[in-house]
Amino acid sequence: MSRVYNFSAGPAVMPEEVLQEAAAEMMDYKGSGMSVMEISHRSALFQGIIDEAEKDLRDLMQIPDNYKVLFIQGGGHQQFAMVPMNLFQNKVADYIITGQWAKKAWKEAQMFGEAKAVASSEDKTFSYIPDCSNLDIDENADYVYICLNNTIYGTVFHELPNTKGKPLVADISSCFLSEPLDVSKFGILWGGVQKNVGPAGMAIAIVREDLIREDVLPQTPTMLKYDTYAKSGSLHNTPPVYTIYMCGKVFKWLKKQGGLEVMKKRNEEKAAVLYDFLDSSKLFKGTVEKKDRSLMNVPFVTGDKELDALFIKEATEAGFVNLKGHRSVGGMRASIYNAMPIEGVKKLVEFMKAFEERHPVN
Ligand SMILES: *Cc1c(COP(=O)(O)O)cnc(C)c1O
């Protein structure tokens, strides 16, 4: 078996232990004689899987009792629509535009009401987080929306915006479970799971109960109402059984590692290996403002497109894969999620140093 170091932004690296466990259980889950892919979503076996997954997630994130945990098929883009469809009462919302994912969410919300951009960092290719301490929040805003960690650009909110009392909705797809978060500061936290949790195809939404309503926008489809998932324990129809099972295994793995405080420490150490090198290198440069750097996604460039391409090619051949940056930024991006071991980052930096020696900057 030969594994690579996978720096993909998503679908992304999974913990090897989790993959091995799933492989061992593939043909016969807990003596049932069936794979988890073959069991009924109405079976006691699956009820055990989803109940434990929810319980472990609640433990890890210390989710207060007045928040529901919802497993929703459809991934990230579907949440761009579900948020306004479920929260619009006055049909006004304020969006903070810190990258393409926030922008897409904002555009989607415009289909359903008045979604306004109250801050943006597009003037500098989203390379920083704007000051959000005193924004022009609409008094009728049903919510304020952010993308907490910007997967493409590699920035993160170290400080939450002042929403002036309005519920804060955050897309946490690419920083899900990377460090502790105070859930009580948010109205909704949602994340697509394929970045830092499990296989693609699902989002997990953590929604404060008072924001789960029956009287959502007229003609909202049943499967797009948070209420449907809340009332049925995410079992209104056949859920993504295998994805929920894999996420559950990752939650157990995170608990075994020591929880989110430990992950935060590890992620800080890991990111520092790469950032310290970028700060000392003459060839490679980070692309975002230092104060807003993400622990999860690290974009960098050489400043020369041909050299970037050569680096990506040679890195791939050496077993460091998926380092190509998003097409809107160019260059490289190393996504170093929870499941990326620190050795992977250290070896990448060694490779970068050797590359720099072969291509010295005069
Ligand atoms: C990947 C990503 C999305 C989109 O997720 P899909 O499941 O592909 O729709 C949304 N937001 C963020 C922050 C992401 O990283």
Image (cartoon, rainbow, N blue to C red):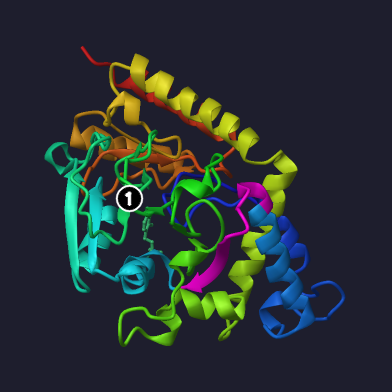
- 192 horizontally vs 88: left or right: right
Residue at coordinates 59% horizontally, 52% vertically from top-left? Answer: 14
Observer able to see residue 19: no
Residue at coordinates 43% horizontally, 73% vertically from top-left? Answer: 74
User: Callout 1: 10 Å neighbours few (<14), some, many (20+)?
Assistant: many
Give the amino acid type for the residue marked by disc 1 in the picture: Ile
Residue at coordinates 68% horizontally, 62% vertically from top-left? Answer: 53
Depth order, front residue of 23/163 = 163
- 70 horizontally vs 88: left or right: right
Residue at coordinates 25% horizontally, 45% vertically from top-left? Answer: 98
Region of the chain picked out in magenta, as a range: 59-73
Depth order, front residue of 328/153 = 153
- 352 horizontally vs 88: left or right: right
Observer able to see residue 249: yes
Pointer 1: what residue?
146
On the image, the x and y values in percent for residue 261 come to 62, 35
On the image, the x and y values in percent for residue 108 come to 24, 68
Q: Which quadrant does the C terminus fall into?
A: top left
On the image, the x and y values in percent for residue 348 come to 47, 31
